[in-house]
Image: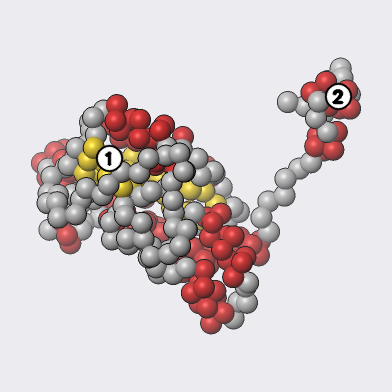
Amino acid sequence: MITRTNSELSVARQCALLDVARSSAYYWPMGDSAEELALVRRIDRIFTDHPVYGSRRVQAMLAREGTAVGRRRIRRLMRKMGLWAVGPRRNSSRPHPAHPVYPYLLRGLKIDRPNHVWATDITYIPMAKGFLYLVAILDWATRRVLAWRLSNTLTTDFCVAALEEAIARYGVPEIFNTDQGSQFTAEAFTGVLKGHGIRISMDGRGRCHDNIFVERLWWTVKHEWVYLRPCADGREQKASLSACFDWYNRRRPHQALGWQTPDEAYFGQQEAALRAA
């Protein structure tokens, strides 16, 4: 909004007209230090391998590796990364107080066909400098990733964008399952689901298996791709993840699917072969 060069008005005059402090015009936000980025990358690896670990156990794991870090700092970084232990706890990942919470609909339900149940979640993606948040829409029965988005903030809009893309490309599921995070309990997200007549299911608080297939997806994406291919920036990370999900959907067989790929299970083997040709 404030132009420092090629302006007929001085910076002081622009600040006065905009009613902002002059010091704010000269402020440049500082990025995370290399030491902090290395620490959050290590926390992410520990949490991906042990998603039931809270800050206390993460601190103990780091101490065993020779890294002394205060628990308060670990809690702050885990909140920044959007990481919450998937076990019973006080103050678990909760919706905004004004957002409604929906019951869990998948208990005892046989899910064996495409577009019966979709699920979603958000995870932290490390980069050489900084990090991003990744959301993905997953078809529960076939494990196929239907849409995904990256964001540098934990807002609702990138989750809605992924949901709308999945619906536009693949139709609508009967049930959509999420956790109780504020991004998914917000009206902007649930309104899209209700507008398409999709039944909303939400994980029980502290239940680590209610959305287990998305948790398994995150482990695969990170251990079999992201950690092996570190990216320098968001543009490079987006291209890398595009290749990752293409590999995951078209070329990575799943034992639970009878060694089919997600594409083969979702589209049928004949159509998947035509798409791959």
Residue 79 disc label: none
Of residues 97 and 194, the one nearer the viewer is: 97
**Residue ranking furthest to the top:** 8
Residue 40 x, y percent position in the rendering = 56, 62
Q: Quadrant of the C terminus?
A: top left
- Label 1 element class: strand
- 217 and 274: which is toward the camera: 217
Camera-nearest label, 2 or 1: 1
Question: Is residue 205 something one can see in this rendering?
Answer: yes
Indicate the position of residue 9 as horizontal and vertical percent values: 87, 19
Left or right relative to 5: residue 135: left
Give the mark nearer the N terminus: 2 vs 1.
2
Badge 2 local density, few (<14 within 10 Å), some, or many (20+)? Answer: few
Numbered tag placed on residue 200 in the rendering: 1
- Where does the image place residue 191, in percent across and percent down from the top left? 35, 30
Mark 2 sits on what residue?
A: 16
| Tag 2: amino acid | Ala
Residue found at x 54% / y 56%: 79
What residue do we see at 44% from left, 54% from top? Answer: 93
Is residue 39 toward the left or the right of residue 188 in the image? right
With respect to residue 271, does 109 lie above or below? below
Residue 151 shows up from this direction: no
Q: Report the Cα–Cα distance between label 2 and label 1.
A: 50 Å
